[in-house]
Image (spheres, rainbow, N blue to C red):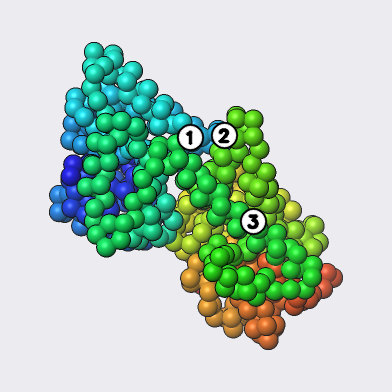
Amino acid sequence: MKIAVVGAGYVGLVTATCLAELGNDVVCVDRDHGRIAVLQAGGVPIFEPGLDDLLQRNRSGERLRFTTSMAMAVRHAEVIFIAVGTPPQEDGSADLQHVLAVATQIGQHMSDFKVVVNKSTVPVGTGRRVEQALRSALADRALDGLEFAVVSNPEFLKEGAALDDFMHPDRIVIGLPAGEPGEAARRVMTRLYAPFNRHHERSLWMDVASAELTKYAANAMLATRISFMNEMAHLADALGADIDAVRRGIGSDTRIGHSFLYAGAGYGGSCFPKDTRALVHAATVHGLRMRIVEATESVNRLQKHVLVERVCAHFGADLRGLRLGVWGLAFKPNTDDMRDAPSRTVIPALLSRGAEVLVHDPVASSEAQRALSADLGRPVGEVDGLTFVDSPLGALAGVDALLVLTEWKCFHNPDFDAMARCMRARVIFDGRNLYDPALMDALGFVYQGIGRRGLLKSALPMDARPSAGARHLQPGVQSAPSLA
């Protein structure tokens, strides 16, 4: 089939590449000439495991092309996916200007029946607005009678596992308009997704509004599970319980399951924060309140401050003279996405209290420097006390404590002896509960997870703290090579 995907961002690139892998003839169009130039030269402007190889294979097979010409893309395609950004506005609502601009451009160039698919995450009612934009553009060309169908087909891609999610979906939600255009679209979409339905029917057919709401409801439910477990973790701390044991206990109930039950330093990324806010706004517009979703968002905002609060509880609110290491900057592993990452809350807070901060992320350092520069109001190279290093041990050179913010696999089983040799004090604040508290105690580490406080003790007396600005290495302790 001939497909066009509008938008060469995260969703657009994954969608275009995976549809090409299924044998379709795909054109991906974006107005960003720089991004298209990178793609045409064989580069990949985002990090997603496996995407580089898949993209190159389909470019070589001439199933995937990139262009800035909307006219060419529209002429080429029988199905056009809209996969552009819908960033949040100040009131929490989704900004649809890019989606509607694309719809207008499609209407300016189409000359036969098209199935226009909203792949972007959009609020209920967007399908109607896209249809109106198309009809207005067609009327301007005296093509009022030209038929088309606007379909909702929301994405359910996890960053870091997006290719597998697309190629092995647990469901494909398709919202169809009423009447003959909807029936025509059903035939087209049935053919497009046939490879996924050979052994098991995964397509869920519904009306457009229900499909649009399904996306928001799914993300709100997952976000709610995370915030629920973070609240339970605080109770576990107060009661002396272990939230990881609680997680395993409740997750074994088949009605609940194990997914998204991990307590941590808060969720981030491009979906959960934006979509929960948009859902709350949509309810407000209709005179309703989403009290559970509001609480979910409120808990998450507070959760991003938990590690800073615990650092201050251990060392005191004045962190001058302390050196702290941070492992992980991206909001989750296997991505360089810094949107709403907890590190963007934690690092500025530590710096504002006078701490020196060494940070490491195996993938996201470049994106983190851009994001933190924006947050701090100046380039990170000009920020006193903030240093990016190239290795995990480099971020531990002479530190008084380590904060774990992202659960990259390279952090799961570190060399604890090497860590101890690098650190001034063996203190770990684990924002992802990667380590076993009993093991940490046996190895001589002061350890505090989220909902796992039972073994917390003081390892660095307050009168032993170094003076401000000191490079306080213990005798015989050397900086990691990356800091030499």
Tell which circle, 1 or 3, labels the residue nearer the N-terminal end: 1
Neighbour tally class for label 3: few under 14, some 14-19, many 20 plus, Cα within 10 Å: many
61 relative position to 356: left or right: left
Q: Residue at x 24, y 18 (%)?
A: 145
| Residue 161 at x, y percent in the picture | 40, 60
The residue that mark 2 highlights is: 282
Q: Which amino acid type corresponds to the residue marked 2 in the rendered image?
A: Ala
The image quarter in which residue 235 lies: bottom right
- Name the residue beneath numbered marker 1: 124
- Location of residue 18 in the rendering, given as x and y in whole percent from the top left corner: 28, 53
- The mark found on residue 236 in the picture is none
Q: CA distance from mark 2 to mark 1?
A: 8 Å
Residue 304 seen from this side? no
- Give whichever of 332, 299 is nearer the camera: 299
Q: Residue furthest right?
A: 463
> Which numbered disc, 3 or 2, marks the residue that appears first in the sequence?
3
